[in-house]
Image (spheres, helix red, strand yellow):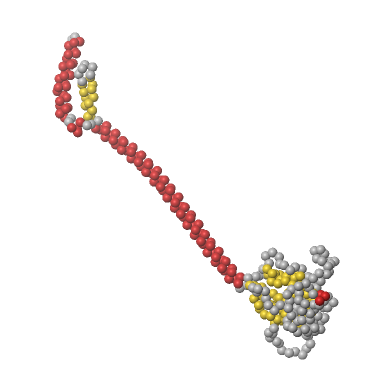
Amino acid sequence: MDRNFVLCSTIVCCVVLMVAVLPSVADECSGDSCRNVISMPLVDDMKATLKADLDVTNMNNHLKAYIEQEIQKGFEAAMNDVMRQLIDKKLEMVNATIEATMHEEIYNKLAMVNATVEATMHEELTRFGVTYIRWGRKGCPDGAELVYTGQAGGNKYNNEGGGVNNLCLPNDPENGEHQLYDNSQVHGAEYYINSDRKPHGMSDNLRYKEVPCVVCYRKQRSSILIVPGRKTCYKDWNVEYEGYLMANHYIQKRTNYACIDVNAEPFDSRSSHESNSVLFYPIRTSCGSLRCPPYTEAADVYCVVCTK
């Protein structure tokens, strides 16, 4: 066959095919059923279009399923991330709340414990205190409780034996039975202060007068200290009273030193000048074995009663 005949035959066959097949396809594909059908030109060089309709329904379904799956995965990942952030934030808030609550509870508990301890200590401290004798006065310093008033006494200034300590004898004694044997040691006391031996600041009206005393109680204190050579207390100690050290004269029998209040007063207006008394002489310093300075020769000796 020649070439022209083959070409003509081919054209005829194609025309017959288009006439026979395409109308049937057109009849089968109409309306919504054709939206998944794609028409594609196959031959166009011969001025005659040959088309094939491809059904992409399955492809669309697979593509749709894939897209939905990917969207679901992305959504789940995003939701997981959001939930994780929300949970972390909530946990931080809960931890912060717990810490704040615990801190507040601990603070409140400690405050309650401290308040209880302080109240207990205060209550216990009110049950304790110290007592001391204020020589030369009938009343206690401000804030101190008076236990009793009395008069100073002790052993006679020239007795060879017996006690040496000074006594604050109460003004309301409970006397024992009278005895016949001789051992008299409890005598009164008097100031042996003259114009030529009167410490600075003391009254001029004390010579040969009897000496009063008072026992005082200071609450909430646990220690008492009598400091010789000073009229002020050391740091953290409280002054109860200040005065001068006095005792028997050095040519007489030894007695304890007493801190006589600088504002000493007489027991009453009577002047006894008894020869059988405890005598309170102002004492003086003597340099030599006593280091001078810091002390000075023949000086009055201060004293101060301190509590803490």
240 or 35, nearer to the observer: 240
Residue depicted at x 41% and y 45%: 85
Q: Position of residue 230 (x, y in %)?
A: 75, 68
In the figure, is residue 283 to the left or right of 142?
right
Residue depicted at x 16% and y 16%: 12
* Residue at the farthest top position: 2
Residue depicted at x 71% and y 89%: 177
Q: Position of residue 76 (x, y in %)?
A: 35, 42
In the figure, is residue 77 to the left or right of 162?
left
> Which of the image's four quarters has the C terminus?
bottom right
> How many badges with numbers are in the image?
0
Q: Position of residue 124 (x, y in %)?
A: 59, 71
Q: Quadrant of residue 202?
A: bottom right
In the figure, is residue 12 to the left or right of 186?
left
Residue depicted at x 22% and y 31%: 35
Q: Is residue 154 visible?
A: no
86 or 63, nearer to the observer: 86
16 or 33, nearer to the observer: 33
